[in-house]
Amino acid sequence: MSRPTYEVEYEQMLLSRHEFLRRRAAGALDRSAYVLLSRIRMQGPMSISELSDAFGLDFSTLQRQTTAAMRSGLVERIPDPAGGMARKFRITDKGEQMLNEERETLVGSLDKIMSDWSDEDITAFADYLRRFNSGIERLSGRPWPRP
């Protein structure tokens, strides 16, 4: 490993294999629903076209994801609040509740993993992750809203 980016690649690969962060209770959100709901929560109601642009996914993939989310009662289709022709997807109360529960579960897992970290270390790690993700977003041309 001659360049530091080899170390980053290796650690990222190891991170992706850990099931601890992905353990879910029966009936919890799958990853795609979690990301979909998180984006709609941050941005507000979105059309299938807006979701396609945001995720860089084709319409058929998003159609499957949004259809599954609608069947599960997590999102609903509404007329465009701005008066446009396209219908938009909005999170339902059930979707909000499940997203909140899932996030609390994940934060609880992170709290356990980082129980011996200082608040300053956790903040620095979050800053590096934000910087890393922002670099990916800049290269892909798909920035994500942040709280």
Image (tube, rainbow, N blue to C red):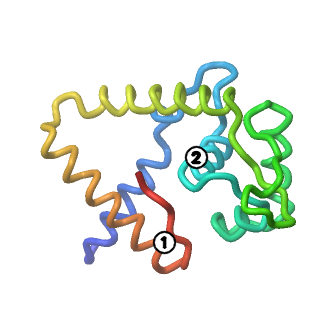
Closest to the observer: 21 or 51? Answer: 51
Which residue: 25% across, 72% down? Answer: 4
Q: In the structure shown, which secondary structural element does the residue marked by tag 2 occupy?
A: helix
Number of on-image labels: 2
Q: In the picture, residue 93 is in which quadrant?
A: top right
Q: Residues within 10 Å of mark 2 (few under 14, many from 20)?
A: some
Q: Amino acid at mark 1?
A: Glu
Residue 133 placed where, x, y %? Answer: 41, 64
Image vertical order of residue 122 relative to residue 82, above or below:
above
Q: In the picture, residue 91 is in which quadrant?
A: top right
Q: Amino acid at mark 2?
A: Arg
Q: Which quarter of the image is occupied by the N terminus? A: bottom left
Provide the residue designation for mark 2. 41
Q: Residue furthest top?
A: 26
Provide the residue designation for mark 1. 137
Counting residues from the start of the chain, the first of labels 1 and 2 encountered is 2
